[in-house]
Amino acid sequence: MKPHTFLSLPILAMAMTATSQAAIVLATDFTGVDRTTTPTATNITWSPQLNLTIDTPDLTIISEYGTGSPAIRTDNNANRIGVNYNVETGGGRSWSTFFTITTTTVLDLTSFNVAYHAISGGGDDQVSATKNGDFTFTLYSGAGTGGAQLFTETKDNLAETSPALGAVADYDLSGLSNLSAGTYTIKLQVEAGSEALGNNWAMDNIELNADAVPEPSSTALLGLGGIALILRRRK
């Protein structure tokens, strides 16, 4: 038996574990979102990948608690959702939105990112002061928010510091491996953080990242092909 035959085994193992590759499986930068004073944003351009579809492409802003009805206000900066609703600290006023996705591929989720901008009630950027917010991401099984809660995390007092624009909430989803094919719902909730008087927030640049998990049949074929190659070299 030739010594180099044994070297093929670890190489084969590496090849089998390298069959999945991280990808952006869903994204939007809100290009083309319709300007409206209603609570629902329409005409949002989504970019689903890896056999993933978005079942609820429109986003409706919901008042979590407190009074008033939030409205969408896409401002002069456009290509983002400016929410005309002043949130407060301590559970006084908060808004949320959710969307439902379906995947026919088993996924290893890696991360979810969303950018927020502090704005005035009229939709203008607040560039002269530091603002912070509490931004919560929750993943549910099934359509809507009544299913099992698979993951939730709050980014407390995430700051947008003048003169920079934007506070990016980045959630590590690496613990959600082998997410089976099916329907899931993502909910985003916004509060004011430690701001004494609260403030308004706009939402931009949503991105969900994941690895596609190879089907067992594909992995088996790769393994058989590698074994056949080894056997040919032994002859």
Image (cartoon, grey):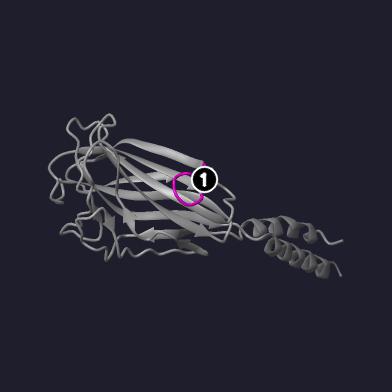
Whether residue 220 is situated above or below residue 202 in the rendered picture: below
Q: Quadrant of the N terminus?
A: bottom right
Residue 165, position as x, y percentages in the image = 21, 48
Q: Considering depth in this image, is 146 or 10 the residue closer to the camera?
A: 146
Magenta span main SS: loop
- Quarter of the image for residue 129 reads top left
- Assess disc 1: are there few (<14), some (14-19) or many (≥20) residues with their C-alpha within 10 Å of its C-alpha: few
Residue 78, position as x, y percentages in the image = 21, 60
Residue identifier under label 1? 174
Q: Quadrant of the C terminus?
A: bottom right
Horizontal relation, residue 170 to residue 198: left or right: right
Q: Residue sitting at 71 percent across and 59 percent down? A: 12
Q: Considering depth in this image, is 201 or 83 the residue closer to the camera?
A: 83
- Quarter of the image for residue 6 reads bottom right
* Residue 80 located within the stretch drawn in magenta: no
Q: Considering depth in this image, is 132 or 225 the residue closer to the camera?
A: 132
Q: Secondary structure at mark 1?
A: loop
Q: Residue sitting at 59 percent across and 50 percent down? A: 178
Whether residue 203 is situated above or below residue 196 in the rendered picture: below
What type is the residue that disc 1 sits on?
Ser
Whether residue 108 is situated above or below residue 79 in the rendered picture: above
Q: Considering depth in this image, is 39 or 9 the residue closer to the camera?
A: 39
Stretch of the chain drawn in magenta: 142-148
